[in-house]
Amino acid sequence: MISVFQTRAPRVGLALARGLLGLAFALSLAGVAPPAAQADHHENPCANPCANPCAKKNPCAPKNPCAGKNPCAGKNPCAGANPCGGSASVDPKKFKQPAGYTLGGGDVALGRQLWNDTSLSTNGAACATCHTGGAQFQPTFAKAYPHPVAMVKQQSGASEVSAAEMVQFCMLQPMQAEAFDWNDKQDARKLAALAAYVEQVQKSWKPNPCGANPCAANPCNPCKPRR
């Protein structure tokens, strides 16, 4: 025989469960979490965008050496004016050959040596720095000296130069040094040698469409010959 308790227990348990569910639903609508849920709840620091220190101004910005003026700008050898850029003004009297002056023949072998000599400049440059492999020569270089040179015309107003005068101009401007002394025996020897070597180079030079490109020495230059 089944007792009354055994028959009523399932019904009482079901009713109790329904009551608890109803209470939880009512509490949730009221915005009150059950005690157990409140005890286990921890605020997610990533849920609030204001908790992110980077959400506002970057706290590292003042420490960034690039935030202000670039501290490396002054160390860039190209930061100043390009000596070949045409901004300078050169007095033609400093490089033009004196009237009635005759420059003797030059030693081509010595000229080749001086062409690669960086000690002639004050900035570490040599003639070969700009002209390795025939780079930087303009189409007018193929013409016999004296001939017009755009850089000389732009910076001094001189309409044309001889080979020796071109050497003197380069000493003054791109190489930022003193011109050779026309009347000094040793200087005149070096000047004549460089002029003779320039004319020797001129004989075998052919215009290169990339020769006037200031990036000709760049290994990424598409015009640079491949090995």
Image (tube, grey):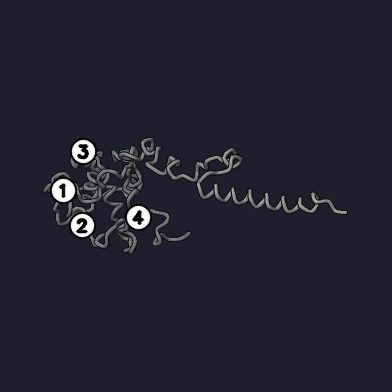
The mark nearer the N terminus, 2 or 1, is 1
From the viewer's perspective, tell me whether residue 43 is left or right of residue 76.
Answer: right
Question: Marks 1 and 2: in contact by CB < 8 Å?
Answer: no
The quadrant in which the N terminus is found is bottom right
Amino acid residing under circle 1: Lys
Q: Residue furthest top?
A: 63
Disc number for residue 150: 2
> Is residue 200 in sight in this rendering?
no
From the viewer's perspective, tell me whether residue 160 is left or right of residue 24.
Answer: left
Residue at numbered disc 3: 184
Alpha carbon separation for disc pair 2 and 4: 19 Å
Amino acid residing under circle 4: Cys
Residue at numbered disc 1: 96
Residue at numbered disc 4: 215
The one of 56 and 191 positioned closer to us in this rendering = 56
Question: Marks 1 and 4: in contact by CB < 8 Å?
Answer: no
